[in-house]
Image (cartoon, helix red, strand yellow):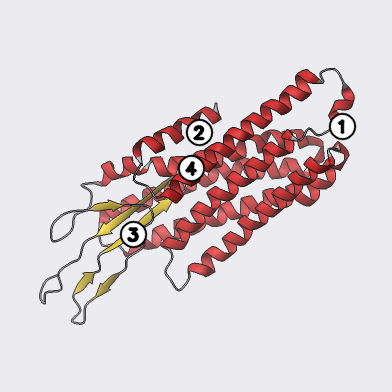
Amino acid sequence: MVYGITTLQTYVYYMHYSEDSLILKLLVAAVWVLDTVHVSFMIHALYYYLIATYGVPTSLEYIIWTLPGSDLMNVFIVFGVQCFFAHQIYCLCRPQVRWWVTAPIMVLVLAQLGFGAESDIMEIIHHDASIVPQILYYGVTPAVATIALAEIMITVSLCVLLYDRGSSSPIARTKRLLNTLIIYAINRCLLTSVVVIVDLVTAVDINVDIWSMGLSFIVGKLYANSLLASLNSREHLRSKSADSVSDPRNGTVHFANLTKFVGEAESSADGTRSSDVSEVIANNASTAFALEKTAASRTEGEV
């Protein structure tokens, strides 16, 4: 069912956002392909254990390659989605602190990729179920822990950055919109973090490792739908906010593409408030959009 939702959201994305960049389209395609391969591998693994070797207890001592292979697809999905949100944080940050904020996140994202890929490849190579406790301790547990830490850091960073943009905005409706984005970010974090933390607890307890396997099955799908929900919600926010913010000069607001950067308001030499033509990315785990501000008058005496 979750895979069906992912497929539907992928279809909606390509139908409504054909103007997006090629890189973003390729990311969505890659996530869907990886999720499809994951489902195919799981079907093969279930067929092997429940049908082909049904009633053969010794088959449980053998790890069919598609079982860790399916988990490897999830590792790649989580890596791609977290890189996407890390890039949005990089775009939202001020130039002076961009790397200070995004570098720790990327270290955790790369760590989960390394731990996750290493544990899955070890299972594919050895096939022996006796190595599972060792892999859980040295590979799976650190991988899930780094996923949870990266998820929390991404959400906190987005909330802080969006709050900072909202608090510095003179427009009340813009503040309310950014507060909505903060709520979306927290909601996304709660869902994925709860599943990942429960997965971590079950991975640590070797007696319930089968539950860890079941939770790992849906982690990738949660992240895939998180990405797609973020992208597909932009049209709704554009229509909702089209008339919510007005420029002092002409009353217009333009919502730009996802790849636009942040523009800063500045004051003129005589103290008059003015702003550059700029775009602000307002993005969280469930929404990503850009707000373009038009140039205000620099004429002396205007407020």
Mark 2 residue type: Thr
Measure how far apart labels 4 and 1 are at the Cα level. 37 Å
Pinpoint residue 231: horizontal percent, then vertical percent.
41, 44
Measure how far apart labels 3 and 1 are at the Cα level. 55 Å
Reading the image, the residue beneath label 4 is 28
> 27 or 105: nearer the eye?
27
Measure how far apart labels 4 and 2 are at the Cα level. 10 Å
Which numbered mark, 3 or 2, is in the foreground of this view?
2
Pinpoint residue 237: horizontal percent, then vertical percent.
32, 44
Pinpoint residue 42: horizontal percent, then vertical percent.
68, 30
Mark 4 residue type: Val
Reading the image, the residue beneath label 2 is 6
Left or right position of 61 against 225:
right
Q: Are marks 4 and 3 in contact (CB under 8 Å)?
A: no
Q: Are marks 4 and 1 in contact (CB under 8 Å)?
A: no
> 172 or 40: nearer the eye?
40
The residue under the point 34% across, 59% down is 280
